[in-house]
Amino acid sequence: MSDFKIENSGDSGSATTLHIGEEQTVVTSRSGIESAPPIILPMGSVKTARHFKHNPPTEAEMENAIMLVEDQLFRIRHSIVNGSTLSTTDVSVRTIARIAGVPDQPNVTLSRDLVEQTFNRLVSIVQGRPASQGSIPTTAEFSATLLILREFMHHLNFASIDVRS
């Protein structure tokens, strides 16, 4: 699949929320007071994790999962309000923020750069680095959640995500 991105610099008048569930991901995007209907994507932490037959997943399993997630994101790219801020209340994203080194506070901001660095730590383990040296979970569900978050922020061009309690 070709690389795609939309422009999303963030602005206080528009917002996008992300919820990565077990079987699906729900995205809502609004501009000002006008909200679009929620977008339901058939990918979630458990559903995507089913593509991983190994712990940690193999490189091929990760690549296949990335392609499936990218296909879903490509489908919704025009439904995301340009310039919106991204937020979530997901505990799983809070866990990723903590692993990425963000202090554990009620409301935090996790940058795309930190998500990338955390994803790269997982990729290092997938490529053979001992998991004990990575200090990052390698379970299928954690890997799937991190992958979905990373691809969402990367392809829909969100510089950060606000994690709220």
Image (tube, rainbow, N blue to C red):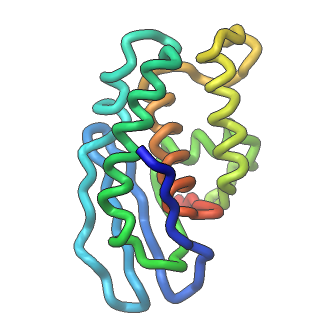
Q: Is residue 113 left or right of residue 26?
A: right
Q: In this orientation, which residue lies closer to the viewer: 158 or 97?
A: 158
Name the residue at 49% across, 61% down.
Answer: 156
Judging depth in this view, the residue of 74 and 90 nearest the camera is 74
Give above or below for 9 relative to 89.
Answer: below
In this image, 111 relative to 70: left or right? right
Residue under the point 30% across and 42% down: 43
Measured along the vertical axis of the image, is residue 61 above or below residue 129? below
Write down the quadrant of residue 126 in the picture: top right
Report the residue that reaches farthest toward the front: 2
Q: With 93 as the anchor, is 28 left or right in this view?
A: left
- Image spot of residue 38 (x, y percent): 26, 67
- The location of residue 72, given as percent across then percent down, is 32, 50
Left/right placement of residue 123 relative to residue 66 reads right
Image point (43%, 20%), residue name: 61
Q: Residue at x 68, y 32 (%)?
A: 120
Of residue 81 and residue 1, the one placed in the foreground of this image is: 1
Rendered location of residue 64, percent (x, y)? 39, 28
Placement of the N terminus among the 4 image quadrants:
top left
Count the marks: how many? Answer: 0
Could you say where residue 100 lies in the image, as x and y percent from the top left? 71, 40
